Amino acid sequence: DAGVIQSPRHEVTEMGQEVTLRCKPISGHDYLFWYRQTMMRGLELLIYFNNNVPIDDSGMPEDRFSAKMPNASFSTLKIQPSEPRDSAVYFCASSLGGKQPQHFGDGTRLSIL
Amino acid sequence: DQQVKQNSPSLSVQEGRISILNCDYTNSMFDYFLWYKKYPAEGPTFLISISSIKDKNEDGRFTVFLNKSAKHLSLHIVPSQPGDSAVYFCAARKNYGGSQGNLIFGKGTKLSVKP
C-alpha cells in the first residue's frame, strides 16, 4: 500500500526564492492536511482540504504561504518569497473521512539560507 | 497558549518494564484523543486513540487512559521493547459537530527503551 508521498524530501534554497512542496495523498482519502514542525512551536496545522476544497486555512502564517489542491491526488504548498524563519519540516497527511486517524507522509525538510 | 501539553520531553525505561507517557489538555471541547509515534526522518504514525466517552482503550501492549475531570491522558506500554524507542505525540480534536475538527498536538516525549 502506498502511503502519503511528499516531495522533495529535502530542500535548501536562498531567501527570497519561491518554494513549492508537493503531496500525493493516499488514494481514496478525502481529507488532506498540511502541517509544519519546528522546535519552538511543535507540530502545527497550516491548512486542510475536504474533497479538494480548503476548509480551514487559519493556521497559514501569512500571505506568503498558499496551498492548492487541483485534484484528489495532488496538493502543493507554496512559499513566495521564502524567509529563513520558514525553515522547518513540513508534513502532509490524509484521512478517509473527517473522524479517522490521519496518515502522515515522511515530510519535507526545508532550509532557507 | 498550549492547549495540549506533554511536560516530559524525554523518558528512559528498561526493556521489559512499563513506559508511561503523560499528556494534559486545557480545552474541555476536545472529544477525541490520539497518540502518534514518530521515528527520525519519518512522519508520525497513528498508534491508538480514545473517545471522550471512554476512560480506557487497549490495543495489545498499548493502553490509553483518559481522566476527563483532571483533563489528563496517559499511554502505557507494557512490556517496553527497544523498538518502541521513538518520539510520542499526544493529539486532541475539538468537537465541531459532524465535521472534522483540527488536531492539536503536544510537543512530544522522546522515549528511550534500553536493552
Image (tube, coloured by chain):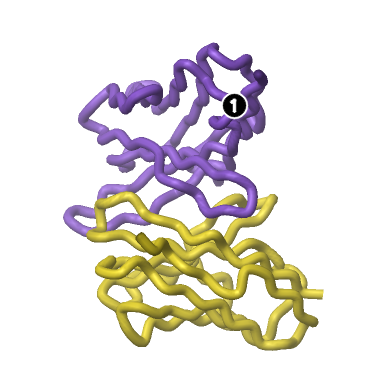
Chain colours: A yellow, B purple
Q: Nearer the viewer, residue B47 or A84?
A: B47
Measured from the top left, where is residue B96 in percent x and y? Answer: 25, 54
Label 1: state its secondary structure.
Answer: helix
Q: Nearer the viewer, residue A43 or B63?
A: B63
Does the rendering let one see residue A86?
Answer: no
Q: Residues within 10 Å of mark 1 (few under 14, many from 20)?
A: some
Point 38% across, 40% down: residue: B34
> In terms of image quadrants, where is residue B98?
bottom left
Q: Nearer the viewer, residue B19 or A4?
A: A4
Point 39% across, 28% down: residue: B71
Measured from the top left, where is residue A44 in percent x and y? Answer: 53, 57
Which residue position holds label 1? B82
Q: Quadrant of the C terminus of chain A?
A: bottom right
Can you say whether A15 is above or below A41 in the image?
below
Is A33 displayed left or right of B54 in the figure? Answer: right
Residue at the front extreme, as displayed: A1
Q: Nearer the viewer, residue A10 or B52?
A: A10
Can you say whether A14 is above or below A97 in the image?
below
